[in-house]
Every structure is written in structure tokens, then in C-alpha cells.
Amino acid sequence: MTIADFRYPRGPAAPGVGVGFKAEHFEPIVETRPKLGFFEVHAENYMGAGGPPHRRLDAIRELYPLSLHGVGLSIGSPGPLDQGHLGRLAAVARRFEPALVSEHLAWSTHEGAFFNDLLPLPYTLETLVRVADHIDEVQNALRRTMLLENPSTYVVFAESTFAETDFLREIARRTGCGLLLDVNNVFVSAANHAYDPYRYLAEFPLEAVGEVHLAGYAEDSDDAGLPLLIDAHNSPVRDPVWALYGEAIRRLGATPTLIEWDNDLPVWPALLDEARRAGRVIAAAAAKNPKRVDAV
């Protein structure tokens, strides 16, 4: 049986706004128990046998729902999925029972080689079939629905025959998976490829979105000296991304939203302030249209 024949449940709700859990923030979290909707962790950090990382996450899990975000499954790889990695992912999901499980529309392995990056894909029918088959395999292993994240991109493929939004829509239709809308990725890719992020958002299959990500970007330049934005996760969310997020929430309604800050970690109050700002965006949208958005 494939996901095309049977739709798995999405798991318990992960309401409100969350942040990525880092060990450096463990003590202030358990001491103050801030009002947050959930915490998200990278699955690969918890694939070991146990130890302090597992004990800390067990303690967080007692207080908050979790979102499990994978970075190493290589769903877009031209080869088969790594069954050992998939088995470890399923084991982490069984142990911590996250509300959400997500991965990236990208590839990072090839013929035994591992790349320290999430690499882009050509949007062709061949790629679509392969990614859909891999998602079916993941969801069958997890016995639940996963979310697939839109990428940040720095190159485009001449052979692509699908727009990214159409590609994601068809993946969701074929597999029953949900989507993770990374608003920062939308803004970064739009800036790098000179298209309108608001038009992209209008064309995105929002009906499939189960989680939203926000993060900070870095400014760089390419080999020709032209501006290039990098999805760096090392700074506060920028104002243009906040504005785009406001439009996304206006269209989506209240949706679990994560603040991603993985590098150059701030002190805990700074990260909490970012989460509270996202909560204010949701509340403001609810005030304007209470029938569409429930504040969290």
C-alpha cells in the first residue's frame, strides 16, 4: 500500500509559535517555562543511543510538543534512500512522538558521498516521480504524514519543466504529504532569481501547509559581483521577511510557526523575542479577520 491509497494522520497539534531547541538554552527554558507552542529539533542530532542530548529532549518533551526536522534524508537523491538513516529517523519519531515531522526538497548524498549542503533539483517529471516515491517510502516507514520544505536556491536548471510551486503542489497531491512553507527561503530565492516573492506566495499550495519557518539571511555577492542572499540562520528575521510572513498568515490563518536560529546563537531572551514577534503577527491578522485567523 502506498500513500496514494491511504492517508496517514498528521499527529497531535503543534499550536502557536515555536523555536529551535538548543542545549545552550536548556536551563532558562526549564526554569522559566515560557509560553511557546513547540520546540523543533534536527532529527540527526538524536539518532544516537542516548546520553545527555536525549535526557534534555525528554525533559523538553514533558513540557512542550516537538517538531522533528530532518536534514540528511536526501529525498531528492537519484539513488535509493539510505535505509539505515530512514530506520534511525523512524526510531527517533517513535521515541519522542513529535507533533510534526519534516524534511527538505533537496539532495545531499550520491553513491556513498555525503555533502554538507542541501542541493537543488531540476523540476522535471522524472524528478517528481522519484521524489514522490521517496516520500511514499518515508511515510510508510514513519506511519504518518511528513511535511516537505520548499528550498532556498542559488541556481536554476534549464531543464526544469515545472514551476517550483506547481512541483510542490503535485508532490502533495500524489503522496498526501503536507508542506512546510519556509518564508525566508521564498524571499532568498526570489531575491537571487529576481522574481516577486508575493506572487510566489499567491501561487503556493497553501492548503497543504502544516508549518511555517522564519529565519535570518546573510548578504553576499556571486562571482559576477551581483548581490546574493544566503539562508544562513544566524541572525534575526529581516523586516522584508516579516512583511511576507504577515501576508502568508493572512492567507493561511494561524499556522505553527518556527523561528530558526542555528548559527551564532543569541542569548535566550533574544530568541524568545523573535517568537513573540511572530505571535504578534498572528494576533494582528486575527484582529483584522477573526473568522480567518485564530490568535495563538
Image: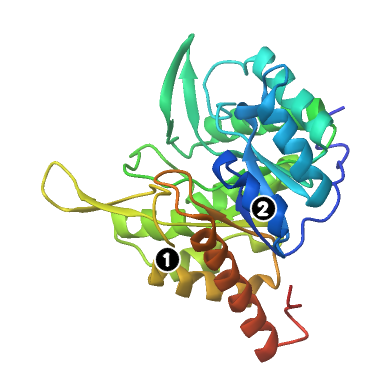
Q: Residue at x 86, y 41 (%)?
A: 8
Q: Residue at x 34, y 43 (%)?
A: 156
Instruction: Indicate left or right for 2 with 236 as reference.
Output: right
> Residue 62, which numbered label?
none
The amino acid sitting under disc 2 is: Ile
Instruction: Indicate left or right for 156 with 184 as reference.
Output: left
Q: Residue at x 42, y 43 (%)?
A: 263
> Residue 29, which numbered label?
2
The amino acid sitting under disc 1 is: Pro
Observer-nearest of 174 and 32: 32
Whether residue 133 is visible: no
Q: Find residue 288 and report its horizontal and vertical position in percent.
A: 65, 90
Observer-nearest of 268 and 182: 268
Q: Find residue 108 and report its horizontal and vertical position in percent.
A: 47, 25
Count of marks, rendered view: 2
Single out the residue that lies furthest toward the bottom.
288
Crowding around mark 1 (Cα neighbors within 10 Å: few <14, some 14 to 19, many 20+) is many
Single out the residue that lies furthest toward the top.
112
**Where the N terminus falls, by quadrant?**
top right
Q: Earlier in the sequence, mark 1 or mark 2?
A: 2
Residue that mark 1 sits on? 197
Single out the residue that lies furthest toward the left.
224
